[in-house]
Image (spheres, rainbow, N blue to C red):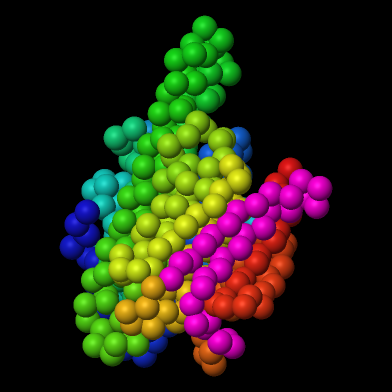
Amino acid sequence: MPLSPSTATVAMPDEVTLEARMECVLDRQRILGAFARIASEPLSRDRLMQHATALVSRAFQVRRVKVMRYRSDPGDLLVEAGVGWKPGVVGEVSLAIDRASPPGRTLQTASPVVIEDLPNDPDFRYSPTLRDHGIVSVVNVPVMFDGRVWGVFEVDADQPRSFDEADIGFLTAFANLLGMALQRQEAQERTIETLAENARAAERAEMLLRELQHRVKNNFQVILSFLTLQRRYVEAPDARERFGTVMDRVHAIALAHDQLSMREAGAEVEFGGYVRALCTNIDPGREGVTIEVVDGNTTLPLDRAVPAGLIVNELVTNSLKYAFDEGASGQIRVVIEQHPDLGEVCLTVEDDGKGIGPPREGGLGLTLVEGFALQLGGRVERGTPERGTRTVTCFPMPL
């Protein structure tokens, strides 16, 4: 979507490290996924929008964010939700919709508006509310609802700030998710209002949920495309490899959402199928090395399937990289077991290669495995097989 004439595109500063860029992309991807899950829950509109502003505040590392709803009768934009504002702003302050108003320009054009120095920009009016909070830089994007502009999502910085295309793309994707969620909520409210339309409204809500999941999938594709583009400009082999590793991790999370999208709303992920899809994605097709998945018909909710799948992704990738010499043959086995008597699910990843030795200095993979296990409330144990490597991760079964 093109920007208004007053906007500016600023490249990411050179001093931002490669690690910081990748972490920013991953953190925003996690935020999109978190909001997609929140949006499917039966929350009130106010709580949904409050969650949205809090997550965007974290993504941009700014204190003040707000969502404004267009009201056709008084012809204004009411601040419906926000974080960081003084009492008397959220739910009470309304802004004009003329072209001199930053959110008004977004409402009129249905396009993002970026202003880096609002107090000194001759094209825009500096509202008393923003002046009272010392706001200097803003970015606005439209919140679309059933093909029309429902309102405006605004990020407000009290320090000079440049918002680049990545910032605008993320905020636009987030606003699209919010618009879809609000649209789904309206369908649910109509269901409550009239029992006669219950079946049709439920079908519409399901369609909107599927569309929401489709948008999430598209957002993952945007992130992967962005990483692929950035990787082209990296010359150092180790940096390119690290980009590839990050892309594999993003793809692992995207696969879990794909598994969920093929099931009924609220269903769990068939974990064995998810792990097989993961292994197919990371299998280099090297002759002589095979990956076997032994499944116990385990199903997991999405918030457990993702970290568990990422554990498998890290361990299988490590075995492929370090367990077998060039031209060597062997097998990697992933065993998924349920132990109802212990109330645990255990993941075993083992190979019959030469072993990968002790953890490498600066290695991130095993650190991530420990972190994901902690997220699951589980534990990681390194086995001592006669040959190769074995790692077992156990975590509580979902209730």
**54 relative position to 60: left or right:** right
x and y percentages locating residue 132 in the rendered image: 52, 67
Which residues make up the magenta segment?
Answer: 330-359
In the picture, the quarter occupied by the C terminus is top right
Q: Is residue 128 above or below residue 23?
A: above
Name the chief secondary structure element in magenta: strand
Residue depicted at 57% across the width and 60% down the height: 307
| Residue 209, magenta (yes or no) | no
Q: In this rendering, does residue 381 appear at all?
A: yes
Q: Is residue 362 above or below residue 200?
A: below
248 and 170: which is toward the camera: 248
Q: Is residue 283 above or below residue 12?
A: above
x and y percentages locating residue 332 in the rendered image: 48, 66
Q: In this rendering, does residue 160 appear at all?
A: no
Residue depicted at 43% across the width and 37% down the height: 262
18 and 244: which is toward the camera: 244
Residue depicted at 47% across the width and 50% down the height: 274
Residue depicted at 34% across the width and 87% down the height: 238
**374 relative position to 34: left or right:** right
| Residue 349, magenta (yes or no) | yes
x and y percentages locating residue 254 in the rendered image: 42, 54
**369 relative position to 251: left or right:** right
x and y percentages locating residue 198 in the rendered image: 52, 14
336 and 62: which is toward the camera: 336
Q: Residue furthest right?
A: 341
